[in-house]
Image: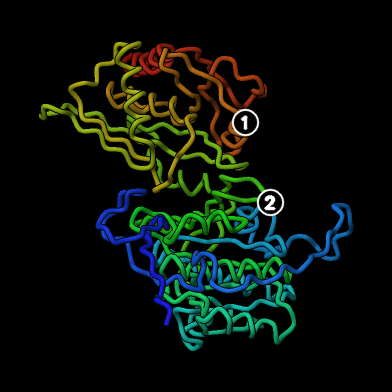
Amino acid sequence: MAKTKTTFICQNCGSVYSRWQGKCDACGEWNTIVEENTSGGIGGGPQRGAARKGRPAALLPLSGEIEEAPRIVSGIGELDRATGGGIVRGSALLVGGDPGIGKSTLLMQAAAALARRGHRVVYVSGEEAVAQIRLRAQRLLAADTDVQLLAETNVEDILATLAEERRPDLVIVDSIQTLWSDLADSSPGTVTQVRAGAQAMIRYAKASGAAVILVGHVTKEGQIAGPRVVEHMVDGVLYFEGEGGHHFRILRTVKNRFGPTDEIGVFEMSDIGLREVSNPSELFLGERNASAPGAAVFAGMEGTRPVLVEIQALVAPSALGTPRRAVVGWDQPRLAMVLAVLEAHCGVRLGQHDVYLNVAGGFRIGEPAADLAVAAALVSSLSGSALPGDSVYFGEISLSGAVRPVAHAAQRLKEAEKLGFHQAVLPGISPDVPRSREMRTREVEALPDLVAIVAGGRASHDE
C-alpha cells in the first residue's frame, strides 16, 4: 500500500515545509504550521500513473456582443459604489471583516434588494441553520423576498445543487472557511481546504456567468484568514471595517478588476440593519466642537469620494524621559516625520511634550494629503488657540518643509463649500483650484507659512 503523502503548511501565509517547525520562516508567525494530507488535493503535486490527456477548448474572438447586462445593480447605493457601479456577472468577490461587524447583515440586505429587483439569489450558509437565517431576515425586514437558502458546507454538494436549478444571478457563500472539498483530505478552515473551496466556486462563477460573493474571516492582525493566494484568485476584495464604540461601518475596496480601488461605502448600524449614509462628511463632523484648540478639519479623498473628517491633536508637557506618541486613525511614522519637520524648519519644540493624535469618528486616513491638517492641529494645541471653525486644510509636507500640492483639489473644496466651510488652507501651486465667492483660499508654499497663519489667529484672539 502506498504511503500517504503529507506536508506541513503554514495556516497564515500558505508556505509549505517538509517537516514541522515552530516558527514560519516566511511570515514569522509561531505555531501556525499544521500537517496536512495533500495526496490528490490542491498542491499535492503530480499524481502517480498515466496523466490525463488534455481536452481542446474553443478559442473565441475578443470582439463580440454581450448577451446580458454586464453588472447587477443592487439598488443599495453605497454597496454599488464600493463595487464600481454594481456586481459584474461571472465575477468573484471576497468580503472580509471582524466577527460581528455586520458582514452577514449587509449581504442579507443586498440579497433581499436584488430579489426585489427580480434577480435569483442563492444564500449558502455554512455557519447558521436555515431557521437562524430566517430569524435574521425577519429582523432585517427581508423575509418577504424570494431569496433561496442552503445550509451546506460540502463544495461538491453545493455545486450539484446549483446545477439542478436555473442558473442564479448571485451566489453568496458565508463563509469560505467553513467549506470542505472531497479533493482535499484535511480539516475545514485549513489552507488546503480554503484554497480548494475558493477555486471551485470561482471556477463555477466563470463557467456559469453567475456572480459569487465569498465571506472571509479575518485574523487578529485584520487580514483575511487563509493564504494570500485566495485574494489573488478573486476579482475583488472588500473589507468591512468599523470600531466597536461607533455605530457606523465602512465597506472599503482594496482590489477591483472592474472598477476603482480605495473606494468606500459608508453605512450606519441600526436596530433593523444597516442604513446607507449618502453624505459621510456630515456623520464624521456631526458632534464637532469648533471652539476647541487642536482640532482641524481635513478635506480628504477616498477613491472618487471627497470626505471631510476632523483631526484632533493634544500636546501636553511630558513628565517622562521619553515623551509618548499615540496615534489613532493615522500612520504613526508619518506623525513622527511631521513632528521632525516642525521642529527642524519652524522652531516648534515638541521634544518634551506628549503628543496624542486622533481621527474623529474612528475613521482611518491613508493619504499623505492630511499632513497639513495634522500640522495645523498640532500647532493649535501647543499654542492653545482654536483654528477657525469654517476652515479646512489639505496638503502634503516634504522633508524640506515645502507644502506639495495634492490631486482632486477642486472636489475637496466643493465638498467643503457644500457643508458650509468658507475658507481653505492649501498648497500654493494647486493647479485646479476653482475661484468662488463663497470659498476663500489661503495658499501656503512652506510649513512656516502655516505656523504664521495659526500664530496670527492667536494674536487676533488676544487682541
Task: Inspect the image, locate mark 2, and give the three-letter code of the amino acid beneath it.
Answer: Phe
Within-10-Å neighbours for mark 1: few <14, some 14–19, many 20+: some
For residue 264, side relative to residue 6 (left or right): right
For residue 235, side relative to residue 15 (left or right): right
Within-10-Å neighbours for mark 2: few <14, some 14–19, many 20+: some
Task: Please report the residue visible at 44 percent of the width from the left and 31 percent of the height from the top.
Answer: 389
Q: Return the mark for residue 408.
A: 1
In the depicted view, which residue is nearer to us: 114 or 450? 114
Q: Position of residue 206 (x, y in %)?
A: 70, 65
Q: Return the mark for residue 360.
A: none
Q: Position of residue 18 (x, y in %)?
A: 35, 60
User: Which image quarter holds the N terminus?
Assistant: bottom left
Closer mark to the observer between disc 1 and disc 2: 2
Task: Please report the residue visible at 38 percent of the width from the left and 42 percent of the height from the top.
Answer: 329
* Residue, disc 2: 258
Task: Please report the residue visible at 48 percent of the width from the left and 84 percent of the height from the top.
Answer: 135
